[in-house]
Amino acid sequence: MNRIPDLDPYPDRPAARNSWILARRAGIARAEGLHPRRPSHWLRESEPDPAGGQAAILTVFLTNKECPWRCLMCDLWRHTLEETVPVGAIAEQLESALTADRAEHPNRAQWLKLYNAGSFFDPQAIPVADWPELARRAKSFERLVVECHPKLIRENRILPFQRLLGPRTRLELALGLETAHPEVLERLNKGIDREIFRRSAQWIRQHDMDLRVFVLVKPPFLNESEALEWACRSIDFAFDCGANTISLIPTRSGNGALESLAARGEFTPPRPETLELALAYGIQLGRGRVFADTWDLERLEADAARLSSLRVRLENANREQRIQRPTKSLTVDSASG
């Protein structure tokens, strides 16, 4: 197979970016064992709730069709299918996870997260015909968290599902801001700018829903000091837009595109201290809950002892929402203006 040379530059023209990104998937396989009637994964986790306690959460990773956007940094497509699943399959996936969770955990989860490596309100991913059954199962939880692309925040897509869910289950939408850096955000090929995100966030809050925001720590095209500065600016921007919760995600390679950028010197993963300092900055603001994603931490820290210590510190900070050791002072100008 003839691969496009890794040193081919990332296109300046948005129209050429999809092809460039897709070409770099050559040779990268989707995850094995994906089935339209089984979730790709499920797990139990916990996080602080708004009242200061700890919420037990059932997180289900649904198997569905790939997202139509081709974001530069995304590797989630590896856990998706190439076609829409049959009507009823998503509800069957959820029921499978609920049954397995009940068998393993005597205590009932309070919150439910349905993550689908894309957008819950993309009808090619989650058939609308499945909404009533999904809402019926979700009604037994205090909160339902689903993912959505900012461009899919539309009244006719979301309000009907919110009505099906009913008033007793709080609906929380998780949106990827990625970064508040205007030029980098445009180059990520996500199809949004800060104003689009701001309007989507405002709509969510106006309709009595909560907002969770994903922020990348060190996206491509930023050096380490810029990465920390813009992680902090992005946290500020997300809170200014009304975020209740922010999840900091270290940008990771593995999708082919980032390896190409790395070969050109345009991407390296963040250092562990960059992630930790960004988390400290967000928590110390006291404006809402801020978490660091601890999946694949070994990509950031190869030394076993330092990795173990880092994981403990991050998990404690996530759980307690406080920093256990002094961190350097951070001052950034507001990115929201």
Image (cartoon, rainbow, N blue to C red):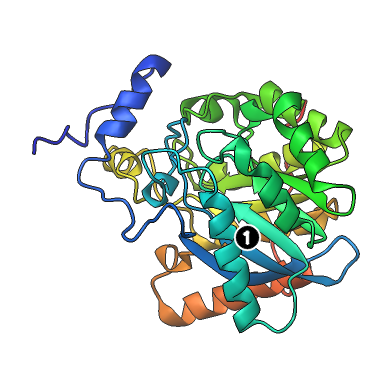
Tell which of 1 and 14 is nearer to you: 1
Percent x, y of residue 325: 72, 73
Query: At x 66% / y 82%, what residue is drawn?
Result: 105
Q: Quadrant of residue 72?
A: top left
Q: Is the residue 17 above or below the residue 170 in the image?
A: above
Q: Secondary structure at mark 1?
A: strand
Q: Quadrant of residue 159?
A: top right
At 35% from the left and 42% from the top, the residue drawn is: 258
Among the 4 quarters of the image, the one containing residue 320: bottom right
User: Is residue 192 left or right of 140 when viewed as pictured?
Assistant: left
Judge left or right: residue 47 versus residue 275: right
- Residue 201 in percent (x, y) is at 76, 33
**Residue tagged by mark 1?**
292
Q: Residue at x 73, y 71 (%)?
A: 109
Nearer-the-camera pick, 247 or 82: 82
Q: Where does the N terminus fall, quadrant-wise?
A: top left
Q: Quadrant of the C terminus?
A: top right
**Can residue 179 be seen in the rendering of this structure?**
no
Does residue 282 lie above or below 110 as drawn?
A: above
